[in-house]
Image (tube, helix red, strand yellow):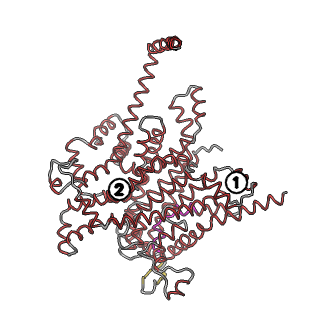
Amino acid sequence: MRFRKLSLEQKNRYYGLYFILPWFAGFLFLFIVPLLSSLRYSFSNLQVTNDGFSLDFIGLSNYREALLSHESYVRILTESVVDIAVNTPLIIIFSLFFAVLLNQRFRGRVLARAIFFLPVILASGIIASIENGDLMQSVVRSANDTAGGGLSIMKNLELAVLLIESGVSMTFVQYLTGAVSRIYEIISQSGVQIVIFLAGLQSISPSLYEAAKIEGSTGYEAFWKITFPMISPLILTNLVYTIIDSFISDETSRLVVDTAFKSYNFGLSAAMAWLYFVIIALVLWITTSIVSRKVFYQD
Amino acid sequence: MKKEIAEVGQPMKDELLHRMASAAYWLEFAKKWLWITVRFVLIFGIAFVIIYPILLKLSIAFKSMDDLYDSTVIWVPHTLTLDNFKLVFQAMNYPQVLLNTLLLSSAVMLLQTATCVLAGYGFARVKFRGSGLLFAGVIFTILVPAQTMMVPLYLQFKNFDLFGLIKLIQGEPANLINTYWPFIISAALGMGVKTGLYVYIFRQFFKGIPREIEEAAYVDGAGYFTTFRRVILPNAVPSMVAVMLFSFVWQWNDSFFTNMYLNEPKVMSSMMASSGYAIATFLSGGGQAETASYVQDPFFMSMMMNTSVLMAILPLIILYLFVQRHFVESVERSGLVG
C-alpha cells in the first residue's frame, strides 16, 4: 500500500516535468544562452562580418563608455528612474481606487468596466509614442482649450494656489498637480493593475463585510480593516508589475535599441542593457523588501 | 387578497413616513446620493479621458482637406469623407497587412497558450528538489528586460541552426530575420512577449484546483495526460480566455520584437511606425522629389498618420466589443488572484 502511493507520487513528479519541457527548452535556448552571450558581448567589441561576427575582449571599457563618456545615457537613465519613482505610487493608488469603485453595484457598470479595460487592449506604448508631437491632435487640443471645453477642466492652477495658501507643502502640491496633468499617462498604464485588483476584490468573502456591518462598522472602517489587508498581497504584485512595465517602455530602452541597430555598437548596447537591468533589480529589491513587511497574508 | 396586502402595506408606509421625519434618515439619504454623484462624475470623467484619443482620431479621420484648413471645424467635419481611409487602405496594402497580422497573432496566441498552460500545470503540480528554482526561472524571465537579450537573440535568429543540422543540409545556417519564424519559435517555446506572466497566471490558477479532483480521476483509471485533458483543462477555460486575449493583443501591438525581426512593414505594429513615409511614397508614385513635397505638408501627413493608427487598432476594438463581457468575467474567475 505504502509502496503504491509512493510510486504514484514519483510518477507525478516525472509527468510534471513533461509538462514543463517545451517551456524549459525555450528557457535554455532563448533565455539563458542569449543572456550569457549578452553578458559576454558587454565585455567585448562585437563586429558583424560576412560569416557571422567576431568578438574582441576589451574588459570594462563598454561600461566605462556608457557611464562616463556617452552623451545622454546617464541623464536618460536617471530620468527613467525618477519617472518611475513618481508614477508608481500614483498608479497603484489610482488603480486600487478605481477597482474599488468598479466593484460596487451601479447602473452602467458593464460599460464602465469595458471602457476602463480599453488601455489593456490598446497597449498604451505605441499609441502614446505616436501621439507625442502629433500636429493635428495638438491643433484640436489647443482649439478646445481656447473654446473653454474639453480637457481644460484639468487646468488646475486655481487649485494649486488654494492649496499653497492653505499651508500645504510646495513639493506635495507640485506632485499632486503634476499627477492631474499626467492623468492620461497614469490611466493608460494602470489597465492591468485595475484588472488584478478587481479580481482580488471579488475573491474577498462577502461574509466578512456582513460580520463587520453587524458589528456596526462604517464603510470607511470596512475598507481599511478588511479590504486593504485582504488585498495587500496584490499591492505587492501590482507594484512589481508596474515597475517592470514602466521600465520596459521608456526612453532608456529606446536608447539601448538605437545604440544596437542604428549606430551598430552592439557591445555598448549590451553594457547599457546590463547596467539597466542591475538598476531595475535594485529598485525592485528595495521596494519589495520595504512593502512585503507590511503585507498581510491570510495563512 | 388585495385588501390584505393593502392592510399589511399600510403600517409599512406609516413607518416610512415616520422615518422620513427624522434627521438621521435624511443624512443617510444625502450621503448616499452624494456618493453616487461623486462616483458618477469620477467614472464618467476617467472614461472620457480614456476614449478621448479614439474620438479625436475618429474625428480627424473623417475630415477632408478643406476641413483641415478651416478654423471653424474642430470636432465635426462639414463634409464627411472616406477618402482618408481609402488612401491609407491602398497605400498601406491594408488587406494584406491585416491578414498577416491576424495570422501571426492567432498562431502566436494558440502556441503561447498551449505551452503556458502546460508549463503552468507542471509548475503547480511538480514537487521535487529544485522545482522552486525552476519557477524562479519563470519569474526571472519576467524581470529581465528584453533589451538585455536583444542582440544575442537577433544574431541567433540571423544564423539559426539546430545543433548544426541546418548547416549540414544547406551548407549554411538559416537566416530567419524578416520571416515569421522567430515569433513562432519563441511562442512555441514559451519565450514570446510577456509569456512569463502567462505561466504565472496559469500556475496560480492550477494551485487553486484541489488535488482531490485529479485523484478521483486516477481512481477511475484515467492516465495523467487524459486527466489533464478531460478534467483539468475544461476547468481552466476562464483563465485561458484571459491569457488568449492578452497574448493576441500584445502580439498585435508589440513593436519591439516586430521592428527587430521584420525589416519590411508586413504587420500592423510596424506599419504604424512607417505609415507616413509609405503614404508619401504612394502618393508621389515612388519619385524622390515628389515624396519630399508631400512630406512638407505636416497637417496632411499628420491626418494620414491618425487615420492609419485608427485603422490599425480598429480590428482590436471590434474584437474587444465582442469578447469584452466574456473577458471581464474570465479575468475575475481566472487565477489572476494570488
In the rendered image, the residue lying farthest to the bottom is: B171
Question: Is B55 left or right of B112, judged from the image as shown?
Answer: left
The span shown in magenta is B138-151
Measured as percent of width and height from the top left, residue B259 is found at 39, 69
- Relative to B287, say whether A18 is above or below: above
- Along the viewing direction, whichever of B142 and B224 lies nearer the viewer: B224
Looking at the picture, how far across and down is residue A259, in whole percent?
A: 38, 72
Few, some or many C-alpha atoms within 10 Å of disc 1 (few <14, some 14-19, many ≥20)? some
Element type at mark 2: helix
Residue B246 sits inside the magenta stretch: no
Give the amino acid type for the residue marked by disc 1 in the picture: Glu
Spatial CA distance of label 1 from label 2 is 43 Å
Amino acid found under the numbered disc labelled 2: Leu
Is there CB contact under 8 Å for labels 1 and 2?
no
Q: Residue B15, image x and y in percent?
A: 49, 13
Kindly state the secondary structure of the residue where label 1 is placed: helix
Position in image of residue B289 (x %, y %): 17, 74
Q: Quadrant of the C terminus of chain A?
A: top right
Q: Residue at x 32, y 58 (%)?
A: B311
Q: Residue furthest front?
A: B1
Disc 2 marks which residue?
Answer: B314
